[in-house]
Image (spheres, helix red, strand yellow):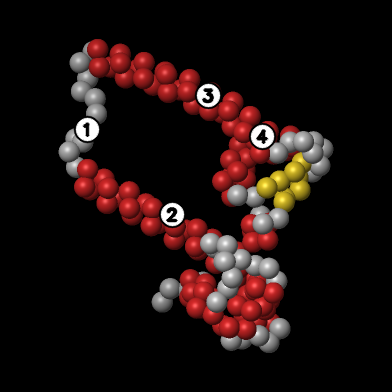
Amino acid sequence: MRLARLHNATLVIAKLDRLSRDAHFLLGLEKAGVDFVAADMPTANRLTVGIMAMVADEERRMISRRTKDALATAKARGVKLGGDRSNLAAESTKGRAVSIARRQEKAMQHAADLTPVIEDIRSEGISSMSAIAKALNERSFKTARGGQWQAVQVQRVLEKMQPAA
């Protein structure tokens, strides 16, 4: 998966039924941004995953309906529902923190995916940041945003992978 993301390659899966048995993997494959093809059903692609996701979505809708019905019943019994909504500034701050954490998580994942590649380059005797950047570009590896590598970006990836002191 890591190399498929780095090279923007297509993942080949032997049997589609193996994929559909593991909902976590199925959803993770979609979220990972990796294209795939199933050898036993070459026409199965993101559309097939979408159909499977639609079935899961229908189940979520039924759960939502049951939950709303239960809340309405509780409200009819006099149970106080909901919470204080006057703290929008704090909620906005939390939202920004979640966004930053997600972007940092993606950056760490990209750095983790690249670390073995950079170590392989270093094992060839290439040690300067500029030379590593050049080697990554020559091997068609893209930055997290899809651009060409520069020395400072290699340095940042290596800093991310340093153990915290």
Residue 85 quadrant: top left
| Mark 3 or mark 4, whichever is nearer to me | 4
- The residue singled out by tag 3 in the image is 59
- Amino acid carrying label 3: it is Glu
- Whether residue 135 appears in this view of the structure is yes
Who comes first in sequence, dot 3 or dot 1? 3
Q: Which residue is mark 1?
A: 83
Q: Residue type at mark 1?
A: Gly
Q: Quadrant of residue 1?
A: bottom right
Q: Closer to the camera, 55 or 50?
A: 50
C-alpha span from label 1 to label 4: 40 Å
> Disc 3 on helix, strand or loop?
helix
Q: In this view of the protein, which residue sits in the foreground, 29 or 140?
A: 140
Q: Quadrant of the C terminus?
A: bottom left
Q: Earlier in the sequence, mark 2 or mark 4?
A: 4
Q: Which residue does the image show at 27% across and 51% down from the upper left? A: 93
From the viewer's perspective, is residue 82 above or below residue 25? above
Q: Which residue is mark 4?
A: 47
